[in-house]
Image: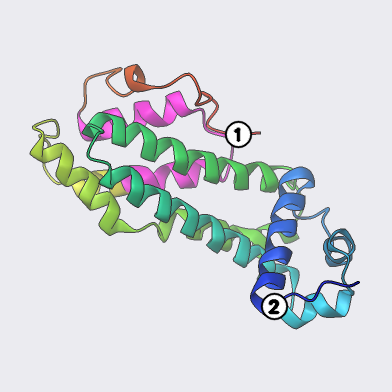
Amino acid sequence: MRTVKSSDERRTEIIAKARDLFHRQGVEHTTISQIAQEIGIAKGLFYYYFSTKSDVVSAVVEQTRREVEVQAKAVIANPERSFIQKMVEFTTLYLERINMLSSSIDQEKGKAQIPELVQNRFEQLSTDMDTQQMDRLVEIGVAEGILKIQYPEAMFTMVVRGIGVIARQRIIPRSEALTLIEQALGLHCGSLAVQSTPKLADSGHSQ
């Protein structure tokens, strides 16, 4: 018997499958027909939810942004973590998501249509980050007496968005991202690295 799904369930299913295919084989090599076939729906049903592949790319990026935002809030609100621990966890989850998108796009280098299709959506992930959460993280660092530079909120926002720009060109190792943050915020060299945990890959990208 065929399972009838609600509109929200079906839309979520399409986004999840598109995200999986983009990650495994790249945006350019993933077709709308392939997404529909993998789910087991008619191609016309896909178009009921998304007019173009560009629209589903936008939905994947937006979903990623929301995931980072929700998890970032949980990390920053955790009373059992110090500022340094929160900064490492925030950086790691952000980097994992942004590198995942970068790996999907990286397969498309040399394809003229890809910047038009993907580049603006990818940029959303770094520019649409919840600045309130980033500012809250910086406030904790100031309150703990760790951040002592002028304009730490602006510096942190700049380095996070800068990491997003670099990730559009290549996968960023977590150690590099942490070093960039240390330098931008005037932290001691290696102060974030010492808080790294074994379960988090240094590449910043989960397979």
CA neighbours of label 1 inside 10 A, class few (<14), some (14 to 19), many (20+): few
Classify residue 164 as left or right of residue 192.
right
Provide the residue designation for mark 1. 206
Relative to 33, does residue 98 appear above or below in the rendering?
Answer: above
Distance, label 1 to label 2, CA atoms, is: 31 Å
- Which residue shows up at 50% across the image and 41% down it? 166
Residue behind mark 2: 6
Spot occupied by residue 33 in the image (x, y as percentages of width and height): 89, 66
Q: Please state which of residues 64 and 112 is positioned toward the viewer in this rendering.
A: 64
Q: Quadrant of residue 87?
A: top left
> Which residue: 35% across, 48% down?
74
Kindly identify the residue that appears in the image at 60 percent across and 34 percent down.
Answer: 206
Residue 163, image quadrant: top left
**Residue that extends furthest to the front in the rendered view of this protein:** 1
Q: Position of residue 155 (x, y in %)?
A: 24, 44
Which labelled disc corresponds to residue 74?
Answer: none
Residue 34 in view in this figure: yes
Q: Is residue 168 magenta?
A: yes
Q: Closer to the camera: disc 1 or disc 2?
A: 2
Amino acid at dot 2: Ser
Q: Locate the N terminus and report the quarter of the image it occupies.
A: bottom right
Question: How many other residues sit within 10 Å of disc 2, few (<14), some (14-19) or many (≥20)?
Answer: few
Give the residues drawn in magenta, as a range. 158-186
Which is nearer the N-term, disc 1 or disc 2?
Answer: 2
> Quadrant where the C terminus lies?
top right
Q: Amino acid at mark 1?
A: Ser
In the rendered structure, the answer to whether residue 81 lies left or right of residue 52 reads left
Q: Position of residue 93 (x, y in %)?
A: 46, 40
**Label 2 SS:** loop
Residue 62 drawn above or below residue 50: above
Percent x, y of residue 54 = 69, 68
